[in-house]
Image: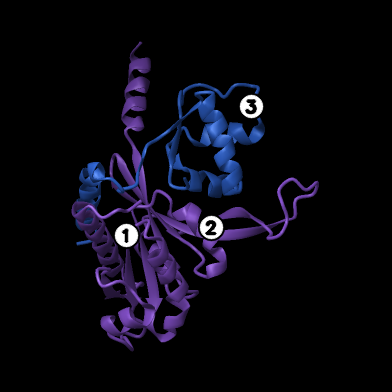
Chain colours: A blue, B purple
Amino acid sequence: MVQTLVSTSEPGQEPPATLMPESVRIYRLCRETRSLAEVSAELNIPLGVTQVLVSDLAEQDLVYIHPTITGSSPSENQVLERALRGLERLFQ
Amino acid sequence: MVSNDFSSDRKRSNRKKMSSKIVIAGGFGAGKTTLVRSVSEIPPVTTEAIMTEASIGHDDTSVTPDKTTTTVAMDFGRITIDDELVMYMFGTPGQARFWFMWDDLVRGAVGAVVVVDCRRLADSFDAVDYFETNKRIPYIVALNRFEDRLDYTAEQVREALEVSPEVPIIDFDARQRLSGGEVLKTLLRYALEHNRVGEPVS
């Protein structure tokens, strides 16, 4: 999903030489965690393409895909409440 | 080695990061981008999504599948809630012809805000209709005050746009950061309430 956060699994390592140039750029960029949408915008790669490249990298364990909060199950209420408290703090 | 410990510590804390998303919908020029801009900690970013629409009347097995591709621009902004939680806001083109793209965007969203320009109520009808029909995620309606006035009351808007009785309708000023923040808080409170009542959201 567009908001999914991605980070390079071993930020200290250099990308494997076999990677495509686009994948190398994603690998380097995601040494700092960012969302798929941000990766797409910063590297100027369309979203759909970014999604495919990132999931290929994840399959090789080169990047880590973070969990996303959808709020659709009551078990996630705690996180939603945390988000609400955060917004109350930021916009008071 | 010390440096390795540090990097694996960093990696672990890094991994706890989670994200969530809010969809900002509404008619053309209703104030979607203005809202994203006023609440985001970064200037709104635009990314392009190449969307493929299969045209009607052709099957997929044809040698040259007759498909049209469209490039759609999406604006988004970011709010860092705390060290571990980031919230993204995505503004989408409001017209019904982009509905195929909304399905993708709405999936996994905490909720949606339909921004309405009261001077052009009809422009927001598609967006309201989408969320009323799909009922996949909680949504609220935010009336953007242009020139500090509103031409209709919330209840008049509810009736005109056929908004369900339980959906909150609030008015705000998209240019004001705190006013925009109030919209997001209202959406989250409603989403929480929605979960407690145990209404089917899927």
Which amino acid, mark 3? Leu
Q: Badge 1 is on which residue?
A: B138
Relative height, residue A7 to residue B59 (above, below) = above
Q: Badge 2 is on which residue?
A: B101
Residue B72: percent from the left, percent from the top?
59, 60
Q: How crowded is mark 3: few (under 14 residues within 10 Å), some or many (20 or more)?
A: few
Which amino acid, mark 1? Pro
Proximity of marks 3 and 1: CB atoms separated by less than 8 Å: no
Q: How crowded is mark 1: few (under 14 residues within 10 Å), some or many (20 or more)?
A: many
Residue A34: percent from the left, percent from the top?
44, 41
Tell us which disc is closer to us: 2 or 3: 2
Residue shown at 66% from the left, 30% from the top: A20
Q: Badge 3 is on which residue?
A: A19
Q: Pinpoint the chain carrying mark 1.
A: B
Label 1 vs 2, first from the N-terminus? 2
Which amino acid, mark 2? Met
From the viewer's perspective, tell me whether residue B62 is left or right of residue A83. right
